[in-house]
Image (tube, rainbow, N blue to C red):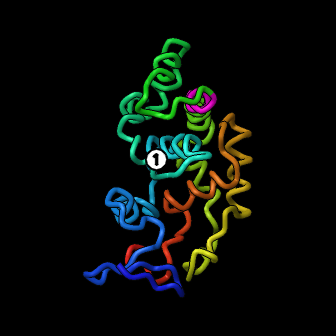
Amino acid sequence: MAVDAHDDVIVDEDGTSRCWWPGTHEGYVAYHDTEWGEVVHDDVRLFEKLCLEGFQSGLSWLTILRKRPRFREVFDGFDPVVVARYGEDDIAGLLGDPGIIRHRGKIEATIANARATLDIQDRHGSLDAFVWGFAPADPRPRPRSRADIPATTTESTALAKALKGQGFRFVGPTTAYAFMQSMGMVNDHLAGCDFG
């Protein structure tokens, strides 16, 4: 692989260009190429991503990506109806599972987020309708380099505040922006990336 230092795009031997951040890790490359930045409107996937972004806080996304299959298994596919009913026995089981991030605060936040998701669905029709209401009205041009990608935006700050107001935990402006990037609410694939 070669790197174009001007725009942080990596070019494979076959000529495929992609953003710098997945490097050469096969799973990370697949995530970049097939998931990251794809538009998502499914409430379960949106809920899952908000929770996993919370678990990622202080860690690398690659760590979460490697553990995602186990997360999905032990959190019942991130079905908010099921997760909202978790109690102390469920929390104890999750704290004992080495296949996930065993952080009590993040586990309890996931349960609280499930309950908040159900409330949002009751009040707003869907989590999708709620979060997509914070998508930028006018998409900005795709970034030329990593330096052009913000950590937060006005919209991500507003989304984080609104989610917290609905009872969500572990959703600050940076987490909200990472969520917006990955769910296709903004397009931060670099201008030279073939997948944007």
- Residue 133: x and y in percent read 62, 56
Is 55 drawn above or below residue 20 in the view shown?
above
Q: Along the line of sight, which residue is nearer the eye, 34 or 45?
A: 34
Looking at the image, is 126 positioned above or below residue 22? above
Q: Position of residue 155 (x, y in %)?
A: 69, 61
> Residue 9 location in percent, x, y?
45, 79
User: Which residue lies at the image location 65% right of the left edge and 37% below the top edge?
Assistant: 168
**Relative horizontal placement of residue 32, taking residue 117 as reference (left or right):** left
Front residue of this view, candidates 13 and 93? 13
Label 1 is placed on what type of residue?
A: Thr
The verdict on residue 151 being magenta is: no
The secondary structure that most of the magenta stretch takes on is helix
Callout 1 environment at 10 Å: few (<14), some (14 to 19), or many (20+)? few
Q: In which quadrant will I find the C terminus?
A: bottom left
User: Outermost residue toward the left?
Assistant: 14
Q: Where is residue 104, by image quadrant?
A: top right
Q: Is residue 76 above or below residue 63?
A: above
Q: Residue at x 44, y 45 (%)?
A: 45
Residue drawn at (31%, 60%) of the image: 26
Which residue position is annotated with label 1? Answer: 63
The N terminus is located in which quarter?
Answer: bottom left
In which quarter of the view is residue 32 placed?
bottom left
Q: Residue at x 73, y 55 (%)?
A: 157
- Range of magenta residues: 105-112
Query: Which type of secondary structure does the marked residue at label 1 adopt?
Result: helix
Q: Position of residue 116 (x, y in %)?
A: 62, 33
Foreground pick, 193 / 6: 6
Q: Is residue 40 above or below residue 103?
A: below
